[in-house]
Amino acid sequence: MRFLRINEVRERIGLGRTSIYKMVNEGTFPKPVRVLGKKVAWVDSEVDEWMLERIAEQRDEVISEISY
């Protein structure tokens, strides 16, 4: 397990800082943890889990569309 800073999260999920913080505020993306002073970071396994959930959702939608 390791911490990811915002730039690493951006690279990993392919979204910008504003989108990431918007999703955090909406409760649709993992919240960062405070690691030192005002510095925050995300737990890599939580970000990976979020990505896997997005993949599963998209595949379920595609399968549903094909079934019709």
Image: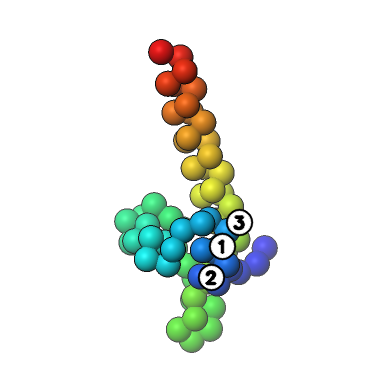
Q: Residue at x 49, y 75 (%)?
A: 40
Q: Residue at x 57, y 58 (%)?
A: 12
First of labels 1, 3 by sequence position: 1
Between the residue at mark 1 and the residue at mark 3, the CA separation in whole angstroms equals 15 Å
Q: Is residue 36 above or below residue 66?
A: below
Provide the residue designation for mark 2: 7
Amino acid marked by disc 2: Asn
Question: Which of 6/49 is in front?
Answer: 6
Q: What's the image's color scheme?
A: rainbow
Is residue 4 left or right of 25 when viewed as pictured? right
Q: Residues within 10 Å of mark 3 (few under 14, many from 20)?
A: few
Asked if disc 2 and disc 1 are in contact, CB closer than 8 Å, the reply is yes
State the mark number for residue 11: 1
**Which element carries disc 2, helix, strand or loop?**
helix
Q: In the displayed image of the protein, which residue is found farthest to the bottom?
A: 37
Amino acid marked by disc 3: Ser
**Which element carries disc 1, helix, strand or loop?**
helix
Between the residue at mark 3 and the residue at mark 2, the CA separation in whole angstroms equals 16 Å
| Mark toward the viewer: 3 or 2 | 2
Across and down, in percent, residue 22 comes to 34, 61
Amino acid marked by disc 1: Glu
Between the residue at mark 2 and the residue at mark 1, the CA separation in whole angstroms equals 6 Å
Provide the residue designation for mark 3: 45
Across and down, in percent, residue 49 comes to 56, 49
Q: Residue at x 48, y 86 (%)?
A: 37
Q: On the rendered image, what quadrant is the N terminus found in?
A: bottom right
